[in-house]
Image (cartoon, rainbow, N blue to C red):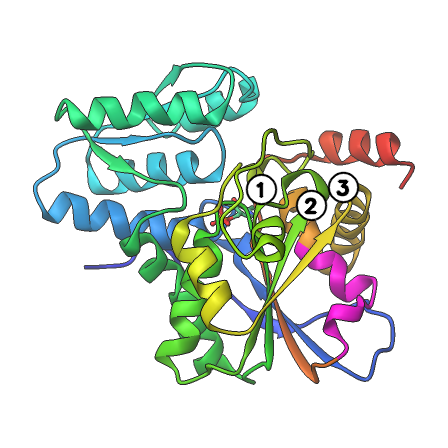
Amino acid sequence: MDQLHIETPYVPHRGLPASGRETWVKMDAYQPTGSFKIRGVGRLCQVLKAEGASALVSSSGGNAGYAAAYAGQALGVPVTVIVPSTTPAFMREKIAALGACVVVEGDVWDQADALARAIAERGEGAYVSPFDQPQLWAGHSSLIDEIVAQGPVPDAVVVAVGGGGLMCGVAEGLQRHGLKHTAIVAVETTGAAALARSMAAGEQVTLAAIETIASSLGARRVADAAFAWSQSRPVVPVVVSDADAVRACARFADDHLALVEPACGAALSLAYDDHPALRPFARVAVIACGGVVVSLEKLAAWRAQFGV
Ligand SMILES: *Cc1c(COP(=O)(O)O)cnc(C)c1O
């Protein structure tokens, strides 16, 4: 099977304050879909097609839905993407432009996801989860295969956490390469800190609501597998503000000439702000997970909103 994602650059981070630490960036904003999601979603869609699926159904108005539409088009399989009413019109258009059928259902992701699962139950399409499926994590784990091959190997990997699919992939990749002591620094924004809250409680916590501009981090509950990794290997939870995330997006645009979502900015903010959670580490890799739910205009509006 030819993979649908590309190998992305792993480069020294530019523009950081002096810290005595080496910081590298894995540039998944350069994927053909603008985010890492195509690694896992692409693999999952290929497996589903090989298993006989003649249609696919996804429940994300963000990067997972966009990646599913891209994968379906590449594989010649029709895709339906169920999105909540909060999905901006420009994202519905971007997804539809890849040939997918976009259906609006409910006001929150859980409602859109329930319809996607119901369609799959009826046998009208194979379900493509945005973050909770083993083939998805296997696809995301290719990030670590590439980092190990490109070098140098870090002693901590910084990832943004929404539903925790990216984190599961990174954990799986680190285990596969015998890097069980390499820490995962798991970053969420204040209004979407389901993993940090769960780790503090020692059990899975479901948030009552999501309150963040980092829409790609908006899962009320992380995948059980993500919580399980946090209990069985080094995972350092960090929570940052929306303002921290936006400031990092703006700096990253200047330093690396790439526009990324606040979800990605949340992860990037740690190195920019020399966050205490990074102190124990000599060499850090930051996953620049990217995201297409952003524009120069949106970034300008967020900067104005947060006085950045
Ligand atoms: C999906 C996504 C995340 C979070 O990934 P999870 O697997 O849901 O934890 C972070 N950043 C971007 C840009 C995303 O699209």
Is 85 on the left or on the right of 101, as rendered?
A: right
The structure residue drawn at horizontal position 37% and vertical position 27%, both measured from the top left corner, is 113
The structure residue drawn at horizontal position 70% and vertical position 58%, both measured from the top left corner, is 268
- Disc with the residue nearer the chain's start (3 vs 2): 2
Q: CA distance from mark 3 to mark 2?
A: 6 Å
| Closest to the observer, 177 or 257 | 177
Q: Do tag 3 and tag 2 residues touch (Cβ < 8 Å)? A: yes
Instruction: Examine the image and state in which quarter residue 252 appears.
Output: bottom right
Q: Position of residue 270 (x, y in %)?
A: 75, 62
- On the rendered image, what quadrant is the C terminus found in? top right
Q: Mark 2 highlights which residue?
A: 189
- Overall secondary structure of the magenta stretch? helix
Vertical arrangement, residue 200 with respect to residue 147, above or below: above
Q: CA distance from mark 3 to mark 1?
A: 11 Å
Q: Mark 3 highlights which residue?
A: 242
| Closest to the observer, 142 or 161 | 161
The structure residue drawn at horizontal position 65% and vertical position 46%, both measured from the top left corner, is 260
Numbered disc 1: secondary structure: helix
Q: Amino acid at mark 3?
A: Asp
Q: Position of residue 19 (x, y in %)?
A: 84, 78
Instruction: Examine the image and state in which quarter residue 98 appears.
Output: top left
Vertical arrangement, residue 242 with respect to residue 153, above or below: above
- Disc with the residue nearer the chain's start (2 vs 1): 2
Badge 3 density bin: few <14, some 14–19, many ≥20, Cα 10 Å: many
Badge 2 density bin: few <14, some 14–19, many ≥20, Cα 10 Å: many
Instruction: Examine the image and state in which quarter residue 238 appears.
Output: bottom right
Q: Do tag 2 and tag 1 residues touch (Cβ < 8 Å)? A: yes
Segment colored magenta: 267-279
> Which label sits on residue 217?
1
Numbered disc 2: secondary structure: strand
